[in-house]
Image (cartoon, rainbow, N blue to C red):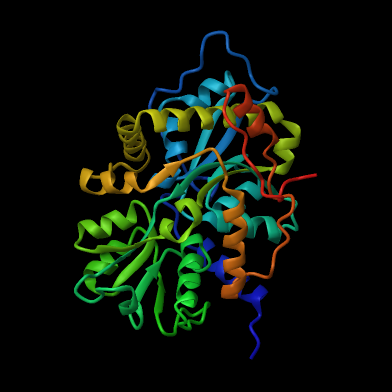
Amino acid sequence: MPVNRSALLRRGLAAVTALPLLTLAACGYGSDAKDDGTAKVAAGAEKIDGLDSVKIGYFGNLTHATALVGVQKGYFQKQLGATKAAYQIFNAGPSEIEALNSSSIDIGFIGPSPAINGYTKSGGKNLRIIGGAASGGVKLVVNPDKIKSLKDVKGKKIATPQLGNTQDVAFLNWIADQGWKVDAESGKGDVSVVRTDNKVTPDAYKSGSVDGAWVPEPTASKLVAEGAKVLLDESTLWPDKKFVITNIIVRQAFLKEHPKAVEAVLKASVEANKWINANPDAAKASANKQLESDSGKPLPAAVLDPAWKSIQFTDDPLAATLNTEAAHAVKAGLLEKPDLKGIYDLTPLNKVLKAEGESTVSDAGLGVG
């Protein structure tokens, strides 16, 4: 029977959208970040574009450390002046896209696959990618007693976070490159792909329900702390060992109506990344402090330290790698071949970078105009 890719994608998105969030807020999409007192409005500050608030979404994990640090050190609030920086925390990309579509958030930090899916499902009308945040931070970690080499992955049970999410697509593509066969929707085949929420993957590993996982940080390092070994760092599969893991997206209507507010958030993001790269140890502590504020529990050093080392923080959205990731989803049968022309608008970011004396970044031919 021929594969109905559109149906697969719809079912995949429905499945991941149903996954629980860190906590449920009144809006039904994500939890509100706590105000730790660092983001005070400067005396005499004015509202940007007449806005009372700008609603920013992000995930509570280290690959979103640009946002974590931006919140913790008050960079977003500083750039927004008297316009309140309001935050929501998500655990699933489709839920963040849903929040963006409903105007529950204006700007979000998100992985490439949800951005691609959100853009294509709306016919290119709901979002734009306006910047990058992070690269890397994804690993294949395995039980060393069961899997000693890459060829030993065949026949084993390997977890990914969600059907059709960024890591799931990457693992399916890697499996295909080995010459192995797996049904994308069921996860059954030469490797059993077990879709498991990152929060419960360590318990699944400890119980023996899975033999390993292709997951982002800090889940990978949590598994290593339980005795797993890193078998493959996904960065080794990419040119220059760089691939997009976190982008910044915005509602198209918000970008059109409030360009100064968008520029302010981008200034804060660039400021956060600059500080992170100049002060890695302090930045690691800042990100962990915000994780503790958001979730009630910081990461232990045995998890935090190795996880942090594998992530690169960059303003460059690495647009060429997004195009490749979309091609991987098509090859896996999870996405019809998309038209991504117009998914980027890097004009505001490049304006900010020029003002900072930094090099501008490319949209790889996928920009507006």
The residue lying at 75 percent from left, 36 percent from top is 256
Front in this rendered view, residue 18 or 328: 328
In the image, farthest residue toward the front: 240
Identify the residue at image location x=53%, y=61%: 17
Image point 35% across, 58% down: which residue? 199
Percent x, y for residue 190?
41, 84
Q: Position of residue 249 (x, y in %)?
A: 61, 44
Q: Quadrant of the N terminus?
A: bottom right
Give residue 168's position: percent from left, percent from top.
Answer: 47, 67
Q: Is residue 128 above or below residue 274?
A: below
> Percent x, y for residue 313?
45, 40
* Residue situated furthest right in the rendering: 369
Residue 2 occupies quadrant: bottom right
Q: Quadrant of residue 141?
A: bottom left
> For this rendering, which residue is in front, 183 or 293?
183
- Asked whether, in this view, residue 263 is left or right of residue 285, the answer is right
Horizontal relation, residue 303 to residue 2: left or right? left
- Decide: is 360 above or below 326: above
Residue most toward the top? 44
Total marks in image: 0
Residue at 68%, 70% in the rendered image: 336
Specify whether residue 35 is in view: no
- For the residue pair 160 and 44, the one nearer the viewer reads as 160
The quadrant of the rendering that contains the C terminus is: top right
Is residue 10 left or right of 64 when viewed as pictured? right
Up the image or down, 187 lies above or below 67; here it is: below
Can residue 364 be seen here? The reply is: yes
